[in-house]
Image (tube, helix red, strand yellow):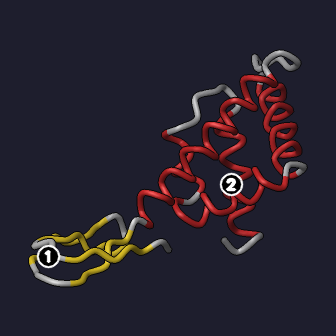
Amino acid sequence: MSEQQRQGSQYYFKYNGNNSGSIIQGEGNYQETNTYASEKKNLNQAAQEIQGLLEQLDNSYLTNTYFEKVKVAEEAIKRIESNPKLYQRVLSALKTGGAQAFEQFLNHPAASFVIGALEDWQKSKGT
């Protein structure tokens, strides 16, 4: 969590978790938590990388049939697992928003299969 001290303002935001927070009036010192924005940015970046990976795989794989989509998803997961930075970013994003949060970001015929694999990761890796 990144927290920042500020002095002298009359209002501040207190993050309460679960995408909520409070505007609190006060004077003196307070802490501003930027965790939610940072986590959402991480989720967005991981989803963009997965989307880019799926689009890249379009050059090598067809996605017309069920089995072709599964093959693309399988290759995408292999590539995510072989890239330690992306792998950690995806695991962190899963902790933040869960696999279903990726639905709003991914637009590809194989996206539902990738999301299914991410849900499995979430269960098996305890994220």
Q: Would you name the residue on which mark 1 appears?
A: 24
Dividing the picture into quadrants, the one containing residue 62 is top right
Residue found at the very far bottom of the displayed protein: 28
Q: Left of 125 or right of it: where is 83?
A: right
Considering only vertical position in the picture, is 78 above or below 106? below
- Within-10-Å neighbours for mark 1: few <14, some 14–19, many 20+: few
Figure disc tally: 2
Please name which of the two marks, 2 or 1, marks the residue nearer to the observer.
1
Question: Looking at this view, is 112 or 77 the one in front?
Answer: 77
Considering only vertical position in the picture, is 92 above or below 25? above
Question: Looking at this view, is 4 or 14 the one in front?
Answer: 4
Amino acid under label 1? Ile
Percent x, y of residue 45? 59, 44
Q: Would you name the residue on which mark 2 appears?
A: 90
Dividing the picture into quadrants, the one containing residue 77 is top right
SS state under label 2: helix
Amino acid under label 2? Val
SS state under label 1: strand
Residue plotted at (64% across, 39% down): 112
Give residue 81's mark. none
- Within-10-Å neighbours for mark 2: few <14, some 14–19, many 20+: many
Percent x, y of residue 57? 81, 25
State the CA–CA distance, disc 2 to disc 1: 34 Å
Q: Mark 2 or 1 closer to N-term?
A: 1
Percent x, y of residue 38? 48, 58
Q: Left of 14 or right of it: where is 38?
A: right
Quadrant (top left, top right, bottom left, bottom right) of the C terminus:
bottom right
Residue plotted at (78% across, 19% down): 58
Q: Left of 44 or right of it: where is 75?
A: right
